[in-house]
Image: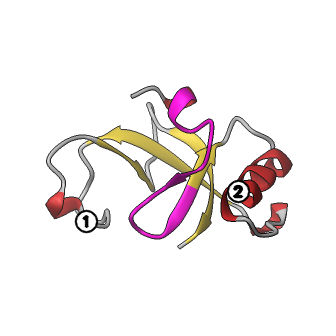
Amino acid sequence: MKFKEYFSEPQYFSDGTYVVSGEFSREEAAKLFADELGDEVLPEDLKEDRVRFGYPPEFVVDCDSLDGAIWYTGAAGIGSKPVWVIGG
């Protein structure tokens, strides 16, 4: 699943967060989240994180119920991608 396409709009994760590409500016991401949630989102409300596509580690919410690879936050290192996160 391609990062750029998937995270071009906010995605809801099972831990209660919304995630969008870190390629957007903080202000652009806040507007995308506001449009999705129908509520004001300030740029300073956003957290920086990284995602990776693969088989999630044990700390990922619902990892026991997943049968395949997924995008998950809390990733680091080569192959991880920057994202903006709100909620959770």
Task: Estimate the x, y position of residue 83 in percent, counting from the top left.
Answer: 60, 46
Which span of residues is magenta-colored? 5-18
* Residue at the extreme bottom: 88
Q: Which residue is mark 1?
A: 62
Residue 52 in percent (x, y) is at 41, 41
Q: What kind of residue is marked 1? A: Asp
Point out the tag, 1 or 2, that comes first from the N-terminus: 2
Q: Please name the residue shown 18% across and 54% down the image.
A: 66
User: What percent of the width, then of the height, locates residue 64?
Assistant: 15, 62
- Confirm whether the magenta stretch covers residue 55: no
Q: Going 46% across and 39% down the picture, which residue do you hit?
A: 77
Measuring 57% from the left and 53% from the top, which residue is drawn there?
19
Tell me the CA gap for discs 1 and 2. Answer: 24 Å
Give the labeled residue for mark 2.
Answer: 33
Protein image colouring: secondary structure
Q: Tell me what residue is drawn at x 67 percent, y 64 percent.
A: 37
